[in-house]
Each structure stands twice: as C-alpha cells, then as structure tokens.
Amino acid sequence: MSGMLYLVPTPIGNLGDISVRCRETLENADFIAAEDTRVTLKLLNHLGIKKSLVSYYEHNKAAQGGKIVERILAGETCALVSDAGSPAISDPGEDLVKQCAAAGIPVCAIPGPCAAITALSISGQATGRFCFEGFLSTAKKSRREHLDSLKKERRTMIFYEAPHKLLATLTDLAEAFGGDRPISLCRELTKLHEEVVRTTLDQAVAHYTENPPKGEFVLIVAGAPAQQEESPSETDAAARVSQLIAEGVSRKDAVKQAAKELGMPKNAVYEIALKDSESINN
C-alpha cells in the first residue's frame, strides 16, 4: 500500500503561526523533505520534534524527487516543507507534487501561512481578482517579456522580491506600467518590524533609493485601469453614411448600417446625415 505526500506550511516569521494540524503531521510523518534542513531543524527543535530529514531543493530536486517517490510508494508518508510558507508555491515542491500525481500518490495540502495572500489582504489594493507572478527572472530578455505580457493586466498583481534586487525591479515595473501605478510594498510579514508602504511606483523608487531596503518583500501592484472607449462623434457618423452612399448603398440602408456599426441610435444618425447633406448642398 502506498503512502502519502503532505504539504506542510511553515511560519513566514512568527513561530506562533504553526497550526496544531501541521505539528501533528510533522510528528506522524515517516520522514520530512526540507528545502533547507538547517532551517527546518530549528523549527523542529522549537516544536520538540525529532524526525528523519532529507534535503529537497531547486538544485537537487531531479535526483531526490525520484527517491522520495520510491519511499512513498513503498508505504512511507512524507511531509514536504519549504523554509517559510506554503510548499509548492513558487517553490521546487511543485515538481515533487507533479511526480506524485503521475505516480498515483495522494497529495494532501494543509492550509497555513502564505506570504502572497497575507500581503494581498493588507495591501489596500483590489482583492477580488488577482494573479500571482512570483519572482521576476534575472535574465533581461525573459524579464522584459514577462512584464510586457502584463501591461494590460487588469487584475491585481503579486510579486516576490529580495531586498538587493528591489530597486531594479521597481524601476522595471515603473517603466513597464507607468510611474503613477499604485503599489503596496509589504515586508517582514508577521515579524516584529512588519511594514506596509502604500505608494506609487515612482515614489517607491525614490524612497528606496534614499532608504536601502531590508527584509523580504511582497509587491502588490494595482492592475491596469479600464480604458474608456471614446463615443463615436457626429463626424464619424456623417463620414460613414457618406462613405456607404458613395459605395452605392441607399441613404436609408446607409443610415441603418452606420448606426449598427457605431452603436448609435438610428434616428440620431439619420438627423446627422440629413444635416450633413444640407450643409453640402448649401
């Protein structure tokens, strides 16, 4: 009988955020797969738990993933943890979940701390519709293509960023979206010095140029504003009717077609066309 993979979220700052269920899962698992075993060991020591740890992170996931799957298929249960927050979200655990799904292994996700949702909820930005974009690529071409694809994005956007890359990212965001785009910068979430800065991209660039950033950041960027379509003018209506008549369409049919194309009342287009005809004849 196969075992199971548990996704166990860990505190993003405040150790008090570990849930009873997460603690019980860590206690009962046969082994724990950790992004950084040193970080996880500190948490386990805090909880008074002794458990077998295996390393599973970005640069060894190809080799370790298969071994973990084999152990689970043999009947063991594995608890997967990242250094902080929910595993498999912008995290190498994504690949392990895919491997388990392909092997028919049940995967159980336990709700818990997530920096993206925590930041979004206190950002003051729209929360009804949003998209998670994670970390931007450090490769200039990929980074530019990523931001170009988001220029018309109407939903609130969530990015992660490290302090030493923050200023460059803010500069690129301002160039892509415009400096007046609202942004909420959330740092040190759930920690003693938690801070939310609600400003614009240009003002954020100026602020962090003068004040070197510290701590990990979640950036909540407002979506693109709705573009207001200009209503067709009398000139547009008159020009379209004249064009259709020149093409051999009767005035009646030209008025009807122009009204439909421009989304205007037929009577209004008729009055415009009549006025235009009278001005030409005069």
Image (spheres, rainbow, N blue to C red):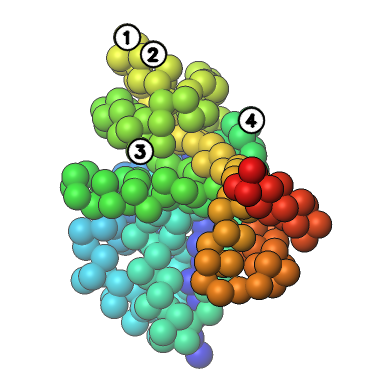
The answer to which of marks 4 and 1 sits earlier in the sequence is 4
Q: Amino acid at mark 2?
A: His
For disc 4, the neighbor class at 10 Å (few under 14, some 14 to 19, many from 20) is some
Q: Is residue 67 above or below residue 39?
A: below
Q: Which residue corresponds to mark 3?
A: 176
Q: Is residue 233 above or below residue 177?
A: below
Label 4 SS: loop
The image position of residue 186, as x and y in percent, is: 50, 29
On the rendered image, what quadrant is the C terminus found in? top right
Q: Which residue corresponds to mark 1?
A: 210
The image position of residue 92, as x and y in percent, is: 34, 60
Q: From this viewpoint, which residue is outermost toward the top?
A: 210
Kindly indicate whether the residue at mark 2 contacts the one at mark 4 (C-beta within 8 angstroms): no
Label 3 SS: helix
> Looking at the image, which residue is at 53% across and 79% down?
106
Kindly indicate whether the residue at mark 1 contacts the one at mark 2 (C-beta within 8 angstroms): yes
Q: Which residue corresponds to mark 4?
A: 124
> Looking at the image, which residue is at 73% across and 69% down?
252
The answer to which of marks 1 and 3 sits earlier in the sequence is 3
Direction from residue 133 to residue 239 in the image, left or right: right
User: Any mark on residue 207, and which?
Assistant: 2
Which one is closest to the eye, mark 1 or mark 3? 3
The image position of residue 46, as x and y in percent, is: 49, 39
Label 2 SS: helix
User: Any mark on residue 227, and which?
Assistant: none
Kindly indicate whether the residue at mark 3 contacts the one at mark 1 (C-beta within 8 angstroms): no
CA gap, disc 3 to disc 4?
22 Å
CA gap, disc 2 to disc 3?
19 Å
